[in-house]
Amino acid sequence: TQLLEQSPQFLSIQEGENLTVYCNSSSVFSSLQWYRQEPGEGPVLLVTVVTGGEVKKLKRLTFQFGDARKDSSLHITAAQTGDTGLYLCAGGSQGAQKLVFGQGTRLTINP
Amino acid sequence: DVKVTQSSRYLVKRTGEKVFLECVQDMDHENMFWYRQDPGLGLRLIYFSYDVKMKEKGDIPEGYSVSREKKERFSLILESASTNQTSMYLCASSLPGQVRGYTFGSGTRLTVV
């Protein structure tokens, strides 16, 4: 069974600080995705990475796929209150129709 | 704007009632999924469908059934609602494979009393 473990589970920081969220597995994935979910809403896809070592940037968010395609990280620079939410990573495998989701990291950015 | 629409944002039902949760997508996606989301337990897959009239059990199918008579619509049925089915239910759709990701609906918060 493929599992994805996210750390930390909870993170509360001040506006303007930097942070990194991790998503780790012992399994190799063909793709890794990050979603953000705001209270009362469904998750929204932020990015998909498919190549080992790949780095993608979305404004202040930087996503990296590990070289071995077993892990990923999300780094936020100068966090803003609008970054508050639940961040989910999800892994996909070749030929599989469904994703494996991590448990999520609940991020709170305080003004 | 492409989307997945869940028929209700909030529902309150009584124990023993038969409950229907409806999900419609306008993206011509083959795959559709039903998840429940509970604090501390993450997203748990109930059922998914990769084609009309096709369904597969997910991780927690007990107490649920599904129906997919048309490509755009995927229904989740609670045959006899129980209090432990109080949860946030999320519907999602995707193209075959998952590289392009899922599109989720806004969710239905179901309370069974």
Image: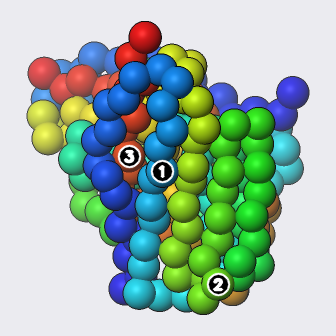
The secondary structure type at the circle numbered 2 is loop
The secondary structure type at the circle numbered 1 is strand
Front one among B25 and A78: A78
The residue that appears at 47% across and 20% down in the rendered structure is: A15
What residue is pinned by disc 2?
Answer: A67
Q: Amino acid at mark 2?
A: Asp
On the same chain, marks 2 and 3? The answer is yes
Name the image quarter holding residue B49. Answer: bottom right
Q: Position of residue B25 (x, y in %)?
A: 74, 39
Instruction: Name which of mark 2 and mark 1 comes first in the sequence.
Output: 1
What residue is pinned by disc 3?
Answer: A105
Q: Position of residue B45 (x, y in %)?
A: 41, 59
Can you say which quadrant of the picture contains the N terminus of chain B?
A: top right
- State which chain disc 3 sits on: A
Vertical comparison of B24 with B113: above or below: below
Q: CA distance from mark 1 to mark 3?
A: 10 Å
* Side (left or right) of A12 relative to B30: left
Q: Position of residue A84 (x, y in %)?
A: 47, 26
- Can you see residue B81? no
What residue is pinned by disc 1?
Answer: A20
The secondary structure type at the circle numbered 3 is strand
Vertical comparison of A56 with A29: above or below: above
* Side (left or right) of B22 relative to B27: left
Front one among A86 and B18: A86
